[in-house]
Image (cartoon, rainbow, N blue to C red):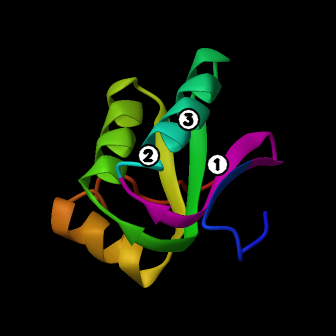
Amino acid sequence: MRFDDPFAVVVAHDDGIPVVRVNGDIDIVAAPTLRRTLCALVDLGEREIALDLTGVTFMDSSGLAVIAEVLRSGTWLSISSASHAAQRVLELAGLTNLCPPRVPT
C-alpha cells in the first residue's frame, strides 16, 4: 500500500488471520471497495478479520455500514488499530465496544 494513494485496501495475513489495512477516506465512494474486500473474505470462510484503520483520514456512515454488515455476518471483526479520525467515528457510533481487540488464547 502506498500512503500517497487517495484510497487503498490491502489484505495481509498475521498468524493466519486476515488483516485488512485501509488508507484514505472511507466514504460513499470508497465504502463499496472495502465492502467487497471484507465480504470476499467472509465468503471464503474467514470467521475472524482484523481491520487496521491507521491510515484512515476520514470515515462517514458508509464505513460504519460496512463494519455493521460484517458484524451481522457473525464474523469476529477486531479493530487492530485506528487513526484519530476513525476512532472518533467508532466511538460516536458505539462500535468500540462491539469490536474489541481479541486476546490471543
Q: Main secondary structure of the magenta part?
A: strand
Closer to viewer: mark 3 or mark 1: 3
Q: Are marks 3 and 1 in contact (CB under 8 Å)?
A: no
Give x and y (percent) for residue 45: 64, 17
Give x and y (percent) for residue 3: 72, 75
Q: Are marks 2 and 3 in contact (CB under 8 Å)?
A: no
Between 93 and 74, the one nearer to me in the picture: 93
For mark 2, what is the residue? 31
Numbered range of the magenta stretch: 11-27
Three-letter code, disc 3: Leu
For mark 1, what is the residue? 105
Q: In the picture shown, does residue 32 fall above or below 81? A: above
Query: Which residue: 40% across, 71% down?
Result: 58
Give x and y (percent) for residue 56: 51, 70
Horizontal side of 66 relative to 102 (left or right) equals: left
Quarter of the image where one finds residue 65: top left
Q: How many C-alpha atoms fall within 10 Å of the one at disc 3: few (<14), some, or many (≥20)?
A: many
User: For residue 17: magenta?
Assistant: yes
Among the two numbered marks 3 and 1 on one chain, the one whose residue lies closer to the N terminus: 3
Q: In the picture shown, does residue 62 fall above or below 93? A: above
Three-letter code, disc 2: Ala
The local secondary structure at tag 3 comes to helix
Between 76 and 27, the one nearer to me in the picture: 27
Quarter of the image where one finds residue 87: bottom left
Three-letter code, disc 1: Thr
Quarter of the image where one finds residue 103: bottom right
Give x and y (percent) for residue 102: 53, 54
For mark 3, what is the residue? 38
